[in-house]
Amino acid sequence: MDLTRLAASLLLVVGLATGCGSDDKHKDDPKAEQTTPTAIPEDLQPPEHKAVRDPRLVLALVPADAEILTITDYDAIRADLGMEDLTSHSLMTDRTAFWEQADRESVMLTDGLLREEHSRLWLDYGFTQDDVDWEARFTGPDGPGFVLGFRPDQDMAEVGKAVKDDVAPLKDARVEADQHLLVSGIAEEGDPVWASDPLLPELVDADAESTYLRRSCIPVNDALGVDATYEDQEALESAFDVTNLMPLEAFSVNVTDQVATARTDVDRTDLHDRADLIDVWPETGTITWRDAFEGLVVADPSTGRIGFKVRNPVAAANLVLGDHLPFAICNELTPLDEPTGL
């Protein structure tokens, strides 16, 4: 699969290209299966060393029928915590301190694919999760997939050896050495991908530490949660008519420095209504909106953005991953069974 041809053509379709043609030059190494996308805007251009540093480029690899994508930019989180130079060669105390602090203070939407095999990977192969700059996970009808972007100076031969040895989290994965990527479940050459949808690239913030991107609205009862009762649904119906909402094709939640920004398509006439839903949303389950977020919710229809502050990063991650997001609900409601009193 040639990433240059795939990504360049797809990004041109969605208007992200600069107008230049793709560079079809291949590496001298005949074993190189892929090259880094090049026909894209300057701010998305990978550096000369060819490592894919911008996590947004993963949209060119995610199959079109995938439903949910999460991106965690560990580089951005390390910078926020003042640990920019952390790698598996750093002191164990520094690495442990980072993960303890990140788990507690950052909205971590992925727990780190390689963390459970930390000791084995370090002792046998010389790398760990600390050498991953960013990580993307996606789910869909064909099962889960992932893309890990390693630091530019990582020896990808070490990663390749772990893959060859079938280390548990790397089973069925593939190394793309030139791009410093480890991939699994990505789109095959010629298949449609998320980058071919004009809306989806616009929903990912360039500086986000964590991004949740869903290619559909959330059914109302899913957003209410499994603990919701008939009375909860009735309370929502009495406060708000969800059928007045516009359809929602896709949305994202981007978190940077304890500020969460939800994004939808622009110029929505229902965006203020969607933001107002947060104030009337029934409190169900063990974690509520007020546990996770705080402050005034601000909506800007012209840009399709809703902004709010993170109160508790762990609670926020649980709400986002659990789809308990009032502003992203669908505009129809399936009634829950009314209690009979028996």
Image (spheres, rainbow, N blue to C red):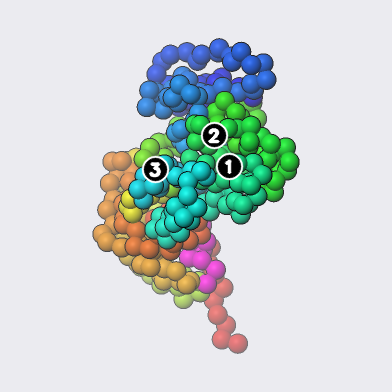
| Image coordinates for residue 194, horizontal then vertical, percent | 53, 35
At x 60% / y 46%, what residue is drawn? 122
Asked if marks 2 and 1 touch (Cβ < 8 Å), the reply is yes
At x 48% / y 61%, what residue is drawn? 318
Instruction: State which quarter of the image contains the N terminus.
Output: top right
Q: Report the disc number at residue 84.
A: 3
Q: Earlier in the sequence, mark 2 or mark 1?
A: 1
Q: Earlier in the sequence, mark 2 or mark 3?
A: 3
Q: In the rendered structure, which amino acid carries the disc numbered 1? A: Phe
For the residue labelled by badge 1, is the local secondary structure a helix, a strand or a loop?
Answer: loop
Q: Quadrant of residue 33?
A: top right
Name the foreground residue: 85 vs 57.
85
Q: Earlier in the sequence, mark 3 or mark 1?
A: 3
- Residue labelled with disc 1: 127
Task: Locate residue 302 relative to residue 146 in the image: left or right.
Answer: left
Q: In the rendered structure, which amino acid carries the disc numbered 3? A: Glu
At x 42% / y 58%, what residue is drawn? 101
Is 224 magenta? The answer is yes
Q: Which residues are magenta?
A: 217-227
Tell me how far mark 2 sits from mark 3, CA to CA.
15 Å
| Image coordinates for residue 137, horizontal then vertical, percent | 56, 45
- Residue labelled with disc 2: 154
| Image coordinates for residue 76, horizontal then vertical, percent | 39, 43
Is 158 magenta? The answer is no
Task: Sort mark 1 into few (<14), some (14-19) or many (20+) by Cα contacts within 10 Å.
Answer: many
Task: Locate residue 282 relative to residue 36 in the image: left or right.
Answer: left
For the residue labelled by badge 2, is the local secondary structure a helix, a strand or a loop?
Answer: loop
Task: Tell me, yes or no, if residue 71 can be seen here.
Answer: no
